[in-house]
Image (cartoon, rainbow, N blue to C red):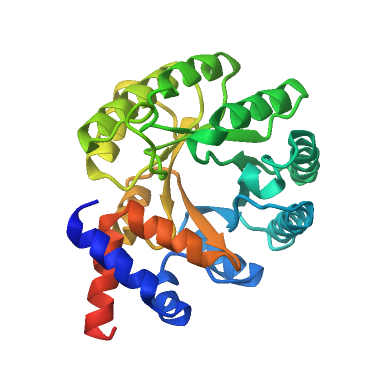
């Protein structure tokens, strides 16, 4: 992040939360489940799928984890009751991964059972590098227990990701491939934009050749163009992959992807923990920082 963006982020962190929310609301559905349902219903009407995410991570008590589990159960019930074309994404540290691995596993398993009854799917998000190995182990354990309605995430900025997909391709894992949102040391993560781009396309090609279903999660024109090329060269069916984007980001681009007759899913976060999520997105994406700056001084 350059100096200007660092200064803007520092400035935003000094602002009262209600003021920050004015600008963050573009990237979150709202604080309540009804807000997320409303957003996903609109997306569905535009031939886009959704994935709903109850914001929150790194809980410190079992009570917080149980609250998150109940909220996610409600999401699955609501998707079914409202006939939405959507699924659920979860973060394991929200379910107590760092408190008790077995406690976490039992609740993820419970959610997968509910999703399975509704013929729905659940994605386990990838978090920072301190949880990567445990996240993959839990995913593989769930697959070994017979769950076929669960997917995982691979981050292209991580140096270990090529080795990780070698493990995942043989089991035809359902993978969201993203660039990576967490700041990591150079010893374990690529830092330059070009390195991350090259690795993203390298991993994408291997996954598609290996017949894994891939959620191609990017807002980068260069990477989308590369994905288009692979799709054409491999003569892939529309059901072999999907594109994925964040709610509120590059809406014209997502419209173009749908107009080009590709499947597209929008990540729809909601909940009380919108502030930490918003700050991380501002830090991750300098363009979002500039949108906020423009809004602050234009009064829009």
Q: Is residue 170 left or right of residue 280?
A: right
Residue drawn at (37%, 74%), measured in percent from left and top? 14
Residue drawn at (23%, 74%), measured in percent from left and top? 294
Q: Which of 209 and 142 is in front in this view?
A: 142
Q: Which of 228 and 77 is in front in this view?
A: 77
In the picture, residue 102 is in which quadrant?
top right
Vertical arrangement, residue 144 with respect to residue 195, above or below: above
The spot of residue 35 in percent (x, y) is: 59, 71
Q: In this view, does 238 lie to the left or right of 232?
A: right
Q: Identify the image quadrant of the C terminus.
A: bottom left
Q: In this view, does 78 lie to the left or right of 185?
A: right
Q: Is residue 235 visible?
A: no
Residue drawn at (39%, 56%), measured in percent from left and top? 281
The spot of residue 129 in percent (x, y) is: 49, 34
Vertical arrangement, residue 93 with respect to residue 177, above or below: below
In the picture, residue 4 is in which quadrant?
bottom left
Q: Can residue 294 be seen in this view?
A: yes
Q: Which of 110 and 85 is in front in this view?
A: 110
Vertical arrangement, residue 294 with respect to residue 40, above or below: below
The spot of residue 174 in percent (x, y) is: 56, 30
The spot of residue 279 in percent (x, y) is: 41, 61
In the rendered image, the residue lying farthest to the bottom is 299
Q: In this view, does 225 lie to the left or right of 106?
A: left
- Disc tally is 0
């Amino acid at each position: 992040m350059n100096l200007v963006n660092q200064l803007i982020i520092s400035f935003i962190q000094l602002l009262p939360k209600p003021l920050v929310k004015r600008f963050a609301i573009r990237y979150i559905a709202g604080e309540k489940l009804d807000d997320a349902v409303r957003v996903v219903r609109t997306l569905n009407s535009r031939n886009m799928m959704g994935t709903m995410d109850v914001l929150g991570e790194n809980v410190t008590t079992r009570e917080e984890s149980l609250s998150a589990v109940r909220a996610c159960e409600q999401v699955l019930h609501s998707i079914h009751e409202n006939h939405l074309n959507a699924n659920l994404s979860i973060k394991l540290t929200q379910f107590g991964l760092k408190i008790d691995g077995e406690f976490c596993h039992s609740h993820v398993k419970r959610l997968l059972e509910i999703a399975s009854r509704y013929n729905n799917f659940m994605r386990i998000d990838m978090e920072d590098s301190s949880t990567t190995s445990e996240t993959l182990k839990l995913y593989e354990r769930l697959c070994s227990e017979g769950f076929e309605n669960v997917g995982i995430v691979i981050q292209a900025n991580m140096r270990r990701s090529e080795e990780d997909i070698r493990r995942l391709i043989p089991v035809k894992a359902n993978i969201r491939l993203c660039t990576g949102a967490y700041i990591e040391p150079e010893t374990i993560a690529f830092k330059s934009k070009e390195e991350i781009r090259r690795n993203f396309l390298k991993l994408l090609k291997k996954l598609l050749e290996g017949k894994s279903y891939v959620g191609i999660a990017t807002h980068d024109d260069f990477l989308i163009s590369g994905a288009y090329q692979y799709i054409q060269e491999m003569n892939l069916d529309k059901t072999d992959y999907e594109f994925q984007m964040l709610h509120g980001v590059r809406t014209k681009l997502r419209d173009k992807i749908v107009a080009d007759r590709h499947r597209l899913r929008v990540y729809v976060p909601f909940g009380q923990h919108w502030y930490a999520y918003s700050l991380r997105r501002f830090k991750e994406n300098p363009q979002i920082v500039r949108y906020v700056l423009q809004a602050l001084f234009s009064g829009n």
